[in-house]
Amino acid sequence: MKSREIIGKEVLDAEAKSIGSVQDLEIDLTKWMVSGLIIKRGFMRKITVAAGNIDKVGDKVVLKVAFEKIQKIAP
């Protein structure tokens, strides 16, 4: 899947609540792999979700965890 196919997709948490949309991909340049997604919430707020917390990517991105847990993990 190409990055342009993922960017802009709606992101749902494990409880099927919409938490925003994919703004960008975080890449690990040593392994050339996606290490996470940068999610845009609202006008200016962004959070990063680690690749290990992603369950499925289809029409929407579905996470393995609830948004409340992501908030505790995110910087």
Image (spheres, rainbow, N blue to C red):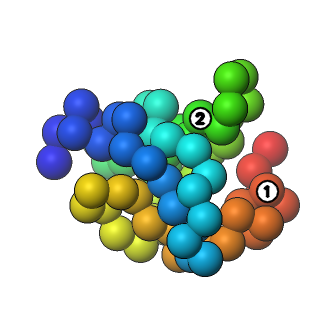
| Residue placed most toward the observer, 10 or 2 | 10
Q: Could you tell me which residue is drawn at 27 percent across and 56 percent down?
A: 59
Coordinates of residue 69 in the picture (x, y in percent): 76, 69
- Answer above or below: position of 73 versus 8: below
Residue 28 visible? The answer is no
Using residue 52 as the reference point, say whether residue 9 is left or right of it.
left
Q: Residue at x 22, y 39 (%)?
A: 5
Residue type for callout 1: Gln
The quadrant of the rendering that contains the C terminus is: top right
34, 18: nearer the viewer: 18
**Nearer the observer, 36 or 69:** 69
Q: Is residue 4 above or below residue 62?
A: above
Q: Quadrant of residue 18?
A: bottom right
Q: Amino acid at mark 2?
A: Lys
Q: Nearer the viewer, residue 74 or 62?
A: 62
Q: Which residue is mark 1?
A: 71
User: Foreground mark, 1 or 2?
Assistant: 2
Mark 1 Cα-neighbour bin, 10 Å: few <14, some 14–19, many ≥20: few
Q: Which x, y percent locates residue 53? A: 53, 67
Residue 72 x, y percent position in the rendering: 83, 61
Q: Residues within 10 Å of mark 2 (few under 14, many from 20)?
A: many
Residue at image location 79% in from the left, 56% down from the top: 71
Secondary structure state at the residue bearing disc 1:
helix
The circle drawn on residue 40 is: 2
- In the picture, the disc for residue 53 is none
Residue furthest to the top in view is 44
